Image: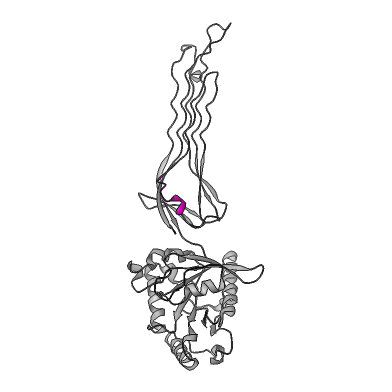
Amino acid sequence: MFIDSVKVTLSSGKGGAGAVSFRSEKFVIKGGPDGGDGGRGGDIYLEVDKNTHTLSNFRGRHHIKAKNGAPGQGRKKYGKSGESVVVKVPPGTTVLDAKSGEILLDLLEDGQKIKFLTGGKGGLGNWHFRSSTNQRPTYAQPGLPGESKEVIFELKLIADVGLVGFPNVGKSTLISSISNATPEVANYEFTTITPKLGVVNVDEFSSFVMADIPGIIGGASQGKGLGIEFLKHIKRSQFLLFMLDIANYRPLDLQYVILKKELKNFSDELARRKFAIAITRVDALDQDRAMCKIEEFFKSIQIDHVDKNNYKFDQKFLSFFQDIDSYKDDLPFFIAPISSVTKFNIQPLKYALFDIVNRIKSETNCS
């Protein structure tokens, strides 16, 4: 099961109480106070672990608490400190205050470890309170309470490329054909009901991560369908690939307009993300009909300077390609007619996505 949001209470341990004790042993007359200090309560740490992929291990766990510190003992013995708890979460987990909704932490990097709550300090034993006027103190400090906070863990998948499209347009088929992901593939809408991540291997040493989310429908940003629940996952994607089904009853331009609108309604930042377009299932139409639909789509998004030879189906390459240095936000990096079933244009698509992801990373690192 994919769990992407959980509410849990985290509590650090209480400090142990200081001891009230007096030295009492043979041949020692009037032994003074020797009560030891209590141990410190355990801390709560949050650690990012790339080997965890969901928040499902928090299912049924409503309260996670560190151990309390042990009380002090005689002979000035310190109490044992409480055992700390390390809470492991997947990369991409946001920690929010459950009451205010404030973002407390954004945990992204594998191995990142943060002390979230500090355990209570142990109380001082009675030997600290001895003085010339009080040689027999009968008082010791109680341990200080630990901290407690109700938080929401919200997982947002981290991917280099996020797939965006209506239900049943071939997103799952594509990610299953070029990556190690194994989503359910079937001929009905909303086959994908949970996000899937897949690693796309370009060669022996190079790869990128692709995310498949449930299909988006008109009105998704207002809560219709399944898309709104998972739109947040592609917010972390560096690059978006719009999947438009050429055999769908919706025209290509209508699919494109609705998807862009839903992204903008959900997040202006997401709507401005660099993107490309894959026109799927071109094998479902004859070549002339498919070419006609693609040309109409080019005109609708005002691409009129394309050499038609670039998207003939006997040339396995991309229809339209923008140079990253002169990239225009309102146009895709490329438009590629593809077929995941016949593998048409799949390899060029994979290499083009890898090239763009690398360029975007380089651009980000330089800035």
Q: Nearer the viewer, residue 299 or 42?
A: 42
Q: Quadrant of the N terminus?
A: bottom left
Q: Residue furthest bottom?
A: 288
Number of numbered tags placed on the structure image: 0
Q: Position of residue 344 (x, y in %)?
A: 55, 83
Q: Quadrant of the C terminus?
A: bottom right
Height in image: 268 above or below 51?
below
Figure coloring: one colour
Q: Position of residue 319 (x, y in %)?
A: 53, 85
61 in magenta = yes
Q: Position of residue 299 (x, y in %)?
A: 44, 88
Q: Looking at the rendering, which quadrant does residue 29 occupy?
A: top right
Height in image: 36 above or below 293?
above
Residue for point 56% across, 82% down = 345
Height in image: 209 above or below 279?
above
Q: Residue furthest right?
A: 204
Q: Position of residue 186 (x, y in %)?
A: 44, 74
Q: Which residues are magenta?
A: 56-62
Q: Nearer the viewer, residue 121 or 315?
A: 315
Residue for point 46% across, 66% down = 234
105 in magenta = no
